[in-house]
Amino acid sequence: MPHESTKILLPEKDMPRQWYNIIPDLPRPLSPPVSPATGKAITPDELNAIFPMGLIMQEVSQDSYIDIPEEILNIYRLWRPSPLVRARRLEEAIGTPAKIYFKNEGVSPAGSHKLNTAVAQAYYNKKEGINKLSTETGAGQWGSALSLACNFFDMKVHVYMVRVSHDQKPYRKFMMETWGGTVTPSPSPLTGVGREILARDPKNLGNLGIAISEAVEEAATNKDTNYALGSVLNHVCMHQTIIGLETRKQLELVGDYPDVVIGCVGGGSNFSGIAFPFVRDKINGKKIKILAVEPSACPTLTKGRFVYDYGDEAKMAPIVEMYTLGHTFMPPSIHAGGLRYHGMSPLVSLLYHEKVIDAVSVAQKGCFEAAVLFSRTEGIIPAPESSHAIRAAIDEAMKAKDEGKQKTIVFNLSGHGHFDLASYNMYFSGKLDDYEYPAKLIEEALTDLPKVKL
Ligand SMILES: Cc1ncc(COP(=O)(O)O)c(C=O)c1O
């Protein structure tokens, strides 16, 4: 029998040298982001208070491809191109005729896809003379990635870490500090937003919406500091497209092309990364299913509404049109912290609204079951976030088995779960529950939406 590759490796010299920008290929234009201060379409000058012009220009660019600067490529070369792996042992274990491939973004030094945009954001800020960034982090993946990226460019970073994760996951904090980051649990007494929340509720455990508000406030009130966001925004999604561009080349090497492409969605960036290059193919006539997977406890696409909403608790970030559960939505404490965000990337939202992509929600116990099977077949312990994509990939492969179809399924393994073992322990001890967010509470959270008239 001829040997077929398990790891499909792209030589460094073939690493893509451009990111793909989906904006000109969208079925209809995005609605403009709105300033929470003026209620009007936000201007580049307003955004420039917290973002560098280089990134603002990418946010609105109409160019289909944007060159990746050499300085960024040089850092990407530390772990990119990441391997595309044929999950033969998983296929065998579930007895499917489908071929399952996964793109392993867990090989980045920070442990997830987040480093792809962290390096780019640090670079464009540094280029415009900014030496300090503020940001938020939930489970700690984004804060780790930005701490490492800022270290490469000799910049400072201040990370507001959601208090519940800060207290439960000290090793992520130590990781950020090892790379030179400073970490503060959020809500904190360092900002007006944090002080107000602590005055009302001194034991507040925090959430991403609050941490974003604190980080934005720090950047908006300090001239030398900019803000960096790890997901949602157009430029962040674009930086991640190197994942899908590599994947397409790697599949070409083995003469394959996907029937199904899958990614988990929190704010939408790793999904955009694996999916957008294939969305372009779909818009150009390819038949392909592109599936976003979210937790049933935070079902933004499948149960949210497509409207203008605030991106953060304190209404400081731009108001964007997106699927949302309402900015006051309090996500339950599930074990995929990175997927607990009330909103969604406007790009992913628009593609879902226009029916270019599909979405499904899955419950956490089924995700851990899939993660354990994956760990025991492929060897890699996945991040709980990524386990949502694994669950959906297995479900698609089982469907192919029932239909007796030979399908090719590709999913993004957005990160490893080495710092999430306490969650695995809870799963093994039977302490995890599934949670379906009640429709009534979503309705309530959606009563406080901004009224936008442009
Ligand atoms: C490993 C991992 N996967 C996925 C996500 C979800 O974010 P996004 O939807 O932006 O990819 C996160 C967020 O923290 C993460 O850490």
Image (cartoon, rainbow, N blue to C red):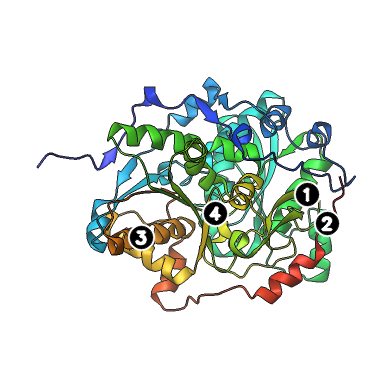
Dot 3 surroundings within 10 Å: few (below 14), some, or many (20 or more)?
A: many
Q: Are marks 2 and 3 in contact (CB under 8 Å)?
A: no
Residue farthest toward the left in the current orientation of the protein: 1
Q: CA distance from mark 2 to mark 4?
A: 24 Å
Residue in the image at 39% along x and 45% along y: 104
Between disc 4 and disc 3, whose residue precedes? Answer: 4
Quadrant (top left, top right, bottom left, bottom right) of the C terminus: top right
In screen coordinates, is 96 left or right of 43?
Answer: left
Residue in the image at 9% along x and 42% along y: 1
Q: In the image, what residue type sits under mark 3?
A: Ile
Residue farthest toward the front in the current orientation of the protein: 285
The residue identified by callout 3 is: 394
> Where's residue 74, x and y in %?
48, 24
The residue identified by callout 2 is: 450
Q: Identify whether 34 is placed above or below 98.
A: above
Q: In the image, what residue type sits under mark 4?
A: Val
Label of residue 319 in the image = 1
**Assess mark 4: CB under 8 A from ligand 1?**
yes
The number of callouts visible is 4
Picture quarter containing residue 446?
A: bottom right
> Where's residue 444, x and y in %?
75, 72
Q: Are marks 2 and 1 in contact (CB under 8 Å)?
A: yes
Q: Which sits in the foreground, 37 or 133?
A: 37
Q: CA distance from mark 2 to mark 1?
A: 8 Å
Label of residue 265 in the image = 4
Dot 1 surroundings within 10 Å: few (below 14), some, or many (20 or more)?
A: many
Q: Is residue 392 among what the camera can see?
A: yes
Q: Which sits in the foreground, 385 or 324?
A: 324
